[in-house]
Every structure is written in C-alpha cells, then in structure tokens.
Image: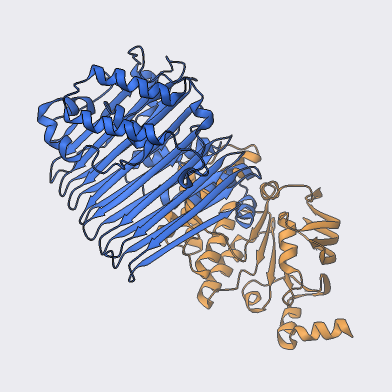
Amino acid sequence: MELKEKLLSSFMAFEERIDVTSDLHDVRTSAIKNFENKGFPTKKEESWKYTSLNSILKNDFSVFPKNENTIEFADVKKYFLHEIDTYKLVFIDGVFSSFLSATTHDGIDVCLMSSALNKPKYKMVIDNYFNKIANKDESLTSLNTAFANEGAYINIPKSKVVDKPIEIMYFSTGSEAALLVQPRNLIVVGENSHVQIIERHQILNENPVLTNSVTEIFAQKRAIVDYYKIQNDNLEANLIDNTYVSQKQETNVSVNTFSFGGNLTRNNLNFYHFGERIVSNLNGITIIGDKQHVDHYTLVQHSTPNCESHQDYKGIFSDRSTGVFNGKIYVEREAQKTNAFQKSNNILLSDKATINAKPQLEIFADDVKCSHGCTIGQLDETAMFYMQQRGIPKKEAKALLMYAFSNAVIESIKIPELKQRITKIIATRLGVKMGFDL
Amino acid sequence: MLSIKNLHASIGDKEILKGINLEVKAGEIHAIMGPNGAGKSTLASIIAGNDNYELTEGEISLDGEDLSELAPEERAHKGVFLSFQYPVEIPGVSVTNFIRTAINETRKANKLEEMPSNEMLKVIREKSELLEIDRKFLSRSLNEGFSGGEKKRNEIFQMAMLEPKLAILDETDSGLDIDALRIVANGVNKLKSDKNAIVVITHYQRLLDYIVPDFVHVLYNGKIVKSGDASLALELEEKGYDWIKNEQEA
C-alpha cells in the first residue's frame, strides 16, 4: 500500500480512538481532506523543485509505534545541554517520556500537547492559537494537523523572563523498521516575556525515520523568542520541519537552524507580521557531506510598516551533498519603511557538491530597503596559504577558515553552553581538534 | 642558511623569476629592492611555498635541506616565516588563539610538547610589549577591522612569537605611518640575532633607515641585476629605478 493510502486509512482508525465530537474533529477532518487532495509534494511544484521525497516515501513507515519504548538518560545525556539546568520535553518514538522530562506549571506552562488538547483548562489557548498561523493549504502541514496529538505545549504568560532554556527533544529508538513521527508544537509567548528554546530530533539506531513536524510560535507585544534547531541526526533521518511564526508589534524573534546531519532535511520557515517595529532573524549554518541534502525554504511576509527582517545562511557542502536556499521576502503595499535583508553564502568543497540558491523578492511598497546577496565559492586560497605559512597544517587551516566563515551566525547564539556545543559539533564535522574551543 | 640557485618560477605560462641566485647567512640582513612587477613578492611567496607559483628550474634550500617539495606548513616548521603584504582576516579566531595554534602545531611538528598556557601567556605579554601592542588587541579577531599599521605590527608580533630562523618581510613598511614604522623596525632589530636571518623586501629605502641591511640586491625583470651594501639603497633612492631600467636596456 502506498504511504498516502496507508495514512488515509490510519486516519480513520485514529479518529475512532479520539473524541469525534470535539472542535478539533473538524480541524482534523478538513486537514486530512486537504492532504488527500494534494498528496505529498513532488518536484513538479515550484517550491519542491530541488527536493524529492520519492525515495523516502518508498519506506513502509509505521504511522503509530507499536510499543512504548524507554531509554536510559545516561545513553542520551550527550544530546542534552547537560552543562546547565533546563526544562525538558522529551518524546520517544512520538510518545512523551515523563521519566526523561522536566516539565513545569509553575508560573509558566511547559508541558504536553496531548494534555493541552484534551484538558478543559487549556481550551481557550487551543481555540485561540492551535492551527491558527499554520498554512492550511500546505499538504504536509495538513497531514501533521490531521494527526496532531503530541508535542510540546509552551505557554508563557506576560512579563516573564523564563529562568532557563527549554529543550524539546524527539528520540526515535528504531524499534520499528521504519517510523513516521509527526510532532506538533505550540508556543505562545506573552507580552514582554522572553524565552529560549532548543529543539532537536535524534534517532538512536539505523532504522529510517521520517519526521514531519509543525511548530507554531506566537509572540505577543514586545516578546523576545530565541529558537534554536539542532539538526545533527544520523544518515537514516529525514526531517520536514514546518515552522510558523506570528509576531505582534515590537517583538523580536530569532530562529537559528544548525543543519549538520540527517539524510534529507527540509526547513519551511515562515514569518508573519502583525504590528509595527517587529524584528525577525533567520540564521542558519549548514555543513554537510556524503549524499546529504538540506533545503531551506524561508518566507518573511512584511505586512506592516517599520519592520525589519534579517536572513543570514551559511552553507558548506562536501562530497555529493546538495543544498537549497529558497528565500522569499514579500513586502505588502502597506509595509512602508521595511528593512529586509537576506544573505546566503556557500562554499563548495567538492566538484560533486551542489547548491541551488534562489532569492525571491516581491515588493509592493515604494519606500523600503531590501537586499539579497548570494555567493557560491571555494575556500580562499590566500587565507589557506597564510595560515599554513604560520605552521597550521592544511586540515586545521581549512577548519579554521570554515569556522571563520560561519562565525557571524555562531556569534548570534545567545546561550554560551549552546554556542560551545555548536562549535564542538562543527569541529567534529570538520574532523579537527583545535588547541582551543573553536 | 638560505641558498637559492638559478631559480626560475612562473605563474601560469608567464615566467616571473628568471634565474635568481642568493645566499643568506645566519646573522645577516638582506634587502631586496626593485620596481613594481620586478618579482619581489613572487620570490617571497615561492620561498614560503605558495603553490600558485611554479618552480620551473633551480634550487631553494635551508641549511642544506631542499625546500622545494615541502608544503608551506612544513617550511614554517623548519623556521621560514613570511610577513604578508596583505595579512588575511579571520573572523571569530582571536590573535591569541591563532598564535597559540600556530606555535603548538610547530612544536608538535618538531616533536616538542605543547607550550603550557601560563608560559604561553608570559611570552605573549613579553612580545606584545616589545611591539607596543595593547592587551585588548590580542582578544580581537585576527586582522578583522585592523588598520594597515595594526596588521603589520601583528605580523611582526607573530614573528616574535614564532622565532623563525629565516624571516622574510614583504613590504612590511607599506601602510605604516612613521611611528608604527619605528615600532615595527625596533621590534625586528630586537629579534635579530647571529642565529637568524632577515630578508627585507621593499620598494622604498625608508624602512632601511631603521633596519640597516648588510646587503642590498636590486631585482629587475626577474633577475638580481645589482648587489651591494646599504649605500646601494641610498643610491637607488637618489637616482630612482629608471637608473636601473636604463642601465638594463642600454
């Protein structure tokens, strides 16, 4: 049976198990209809021109894991930011693990989507925000919505600076031959509040996993949200990340995406503005090799005046890896005095590596500053010679240069321990051990 | 120490060095002067091992050891240092971390233990004082946003840290104001000993007022056409390079 058919029939089984009288029933039903009409995206669609899901969809994915699995903290400690205390939301094969998690209801809610969807006390928040900014036309988002059941639910009331970062961690144990997981995260950050969130997906053995994740982030007036996505999974991991950000006036939201691993990664990152003096930051570092594929598809929708957006994506591609950067900036007629900037800088380390970069600017206002810059190059030979001349061997010199190339984005990491972690991952990726923490 | 015999080098199809002979002994300072395009920087690059240039004929050796097949870092490990005319910017890597990496890689190549951090800090302090470098400067990203003078001073600081056998200073005076020039020259003079040698490459005589050479060579059209003592530099300054050109073309 094709995966699409399997999903459609699974949906019926899934619906039977849950309360069909709830408001969510309608949301799910129309979502599955949209998916049924559109199906999985193909390369015929402009937005999927460079990324094919075909070979992945041939796997016989289980839609629901058969068993509940447990893992020991010691085995997965390294994936957490264990040097500091954090809130933790941990899921194993899509199922919440209370044992590994550290949730809270003390002034803020850091808990589960499943309870938020089912308990009356969260109903108002769910009614107001769930599936409200996600693109209802998009088929993979719809597929996620149809099965939305578990994930992170984070609600920060107004004027709260959350005391420690929140880690959202999705583990796959590989107990299924092939597993499809569809996490659904909802994050609401109240007026004047500030939160830092780290999201990571990690498979723990060699069986293929497809993750189709949807995250909705709502930033109320003057809220600050720093979101970090760590994509350093093994070569059987496939991730489609659909993230939707809604920003009210004077908010500052940053989404930083670090793509170092996985077989196929597609990041659909969408920002929408609902107020003035908003700042949106989209940063990314991609360092891949082998036959890995990373596709960044970004949209910043400038609908209101006096807002800014900054996109800065760095990519380093070796072997036969392929990268895509498709960045769309849309400036509506009302959005005067918009400052929208976009940069995509790429280094190809091998003749077989490919990058497809496509900036798209659609501007309907006449008093704006918009720019985009895209570079594709090799490592600077003069810089290499300079470092080698000082006694630094070629491999280390190369690593230092690549680190320098990614530096602007590394500097944007506001959690020191995370910054250290990311630089360590980069050093490992580049196969070097420097005499200092890069 | 450095022995260059009948050196020919080209970039692409273009021959730039056309038979250079040069002997530099420990304790000596040599100046190589010449008009633009004479091949001065090519000579510096090829001694340091820049593979953009192809050595087509001749020999380069250091203390009797052939350098021509060695990678740039291997030459550095043997004590060759080139102060760049245009030092490269490396964002995110501080001056201190860069020099620490350079020193420890060199020590590793020479089968020595890494330099302990407290000793490293001590040496860094000493050498930065020698070049009148502010401590804050050392934690900045290497050459990023440095003025021309700061970049050159930083090159000589690295030379002081690495203590090379043979230092080649490629147009170290360009972009320096008179105060910076004095500091840099003073640093170089203090680093000079009877065990090392310095080759100063320059277009102008100005730097040679401060770093007084034992020998001056004039490079023109890929060849050394005149050699002499420090007075040759003064004569060149007075008569200009046209003197050399006319003499060669006559």
Q: Nearer the viewer, residue B45 or B53?
A: B53
x, y percentage for residue A171? 37, 24
All told, the count of numbered labels is 0
Instruction: Pick out the residue farthest to the right.
Output: B250
Image-quadrant location for residue A102: top left
x, y percentage for residue B73? 67, 48
Give the colour in which the image draws chain A: blue
Viewer can see residue B94: no
- Residue A107 versus residue A115 in the image, above or below: below
Q: Is residue B76 left or right of residue A364?
A: right
Could you tell me which quadrant the N terminus of chain B lies in?
Answer: bottom right
x, y percentage for residue B146? 48, 65
Q: Nearer the viewer, residue B37 or A302?
A: A302
Q: Residue at x 42, y 23 (%)?
A: A5
Give the colour in which the image draws chain B: orange
Q: Residue at x 69, y 50 (%)?
A: B72
Q: Residue at x 33, y 14 (%)?
A: A70
